[in-house]
Image: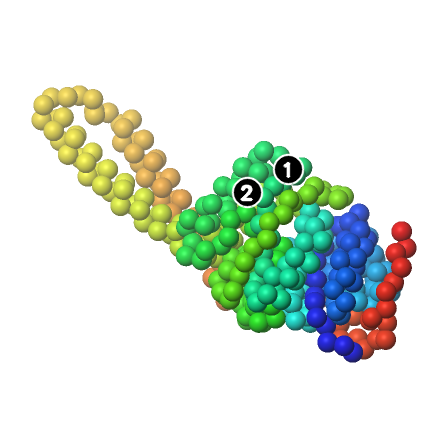
Amino acid sequence: MAKIRYSIVAPCYNEEGNIRELYRRIRAVMDQTGDPWELVLVNDGSTDRTGELMRELHAQDRRVHFIDFARNFGHQIAVTAGLDYAQGEAVVIIDSDLQDPPELILEMIEKWKAGYQVVYAVRKERKGETWFKLFTAKLFYRLIYRITDVQIPLDTGDFRLMDRKVVDALKQMRERHRFIRGMTSWVGFRQTGVTYTRAERFAGETKYPLRKMLKFASDAITGFSFFPLQLATYLGFTIAALAGVGVIVVIIARLYGNQAFLGQATTLVMVLFLGGVQLISLGIIGEYLGRIYDEVKARPMYVVNEAVGFGENSADDEQRMTDDE
């Protein structure tokens, strides 16, 4: 079997309305390269016909491989599984909702051939998204850029091409609370970006509601920054300093006969305030401790029900299949 030149990794969760169009557009793009390629689809515990459609595509075109999870493990874990199984010299991560255009892969390949080992896609415009999503996304990228030591490019997602050396480096990083774009920046290598306009979803609904967005942001911050822990320390010193100043103010006021600080209301407010700060600090510490606990358990990152098409020595690998639609 010819050595695979390119791997396209696409995590899928309830994407029955997108998966055939994703395959059609990726095939149209990758066939232009004239090199062997594979499409690695990861079924992240879908409850619709996504898994069934993956099997159909594999039957039509042996270059389509798929991994079927035993349950839903999350987007970043699905990407990780795709990277673990990908066999190409260059590996592209792309979402299956077609907001990231497969046609941009050709430009990424040109950058890779020019010597870059990571080519990430920078969103210059995001169509079809609410002002709240746009605002929070912009805020998140700038916050993570400020508080981490790793220089993560602004306005980038997981859509990127990586050289085999980069993929092998990422495969050694087995933490469970993952932030792939941060990990890609952390490993280094020669990196560059290409800009594009992010389209609306081709079909279906977003798989990142507010709750998942907050968890994703939490994983990113705690995985690459100690700033929340440092913030708790800063709050402690600040409140201690304010308390010291307050004691001096109260003593002086009492000496001059000021009755403003008599009674229990001020004491009660201060106790509640300090208690709130302490609980927030304990919560921050608990977040980090919980992540340590997850790592110490050393459970497998994901469980595969079935992996189809990998390592097959088939004469069909090079054939060009006609589109059924």
Check disc 1 and report its element: helix, strand or loop: loop
Q: Describe the colour scheme in one phrase.
A: rainbow
Categorize mark 1 by other alpha carbons within 10 Å: few (<14), some (14-19), many (20+).
few
Sequence-wise first label, 1 or 2: 1
Q: Residue at x 53, y 67 (%)?
A: 173
Q: What type is the residue that disc 2 sits on?
A: Ala
Q: CA distance from mark 1 to mark 2?
A: 11 Å
Where does label 1 land, which residue? Answer: 129
Q: Which quarter of the picture shows residue 126?
A: top right
Marks 1 and 2 close (CB-CB < 8 Å)? yes
Rendered location of residue 241, percent (x, y)? 22, 41
Q: Residue at x 65, y 67 (%)?
A: 90
From the viewer's perspective, tell me whether residue 257 is left or right of residue 20. left
Q: What type is the residue that disc 1 sits on?
A: Glu
Q: Which quarter of the picture shows residue 67?
A: bottom right
Rendered location of residue 100, percent (x, y)? 67, 50
Rendered location of residue 157, percent (x, y)? 59, 51
Location of residue 93 with respect to 308 vertically, above or below: above
Location of residue 259 with respect to 315 vertically, above or below: above
Rendered location of residue 73, percent (x, y)? 65, 57
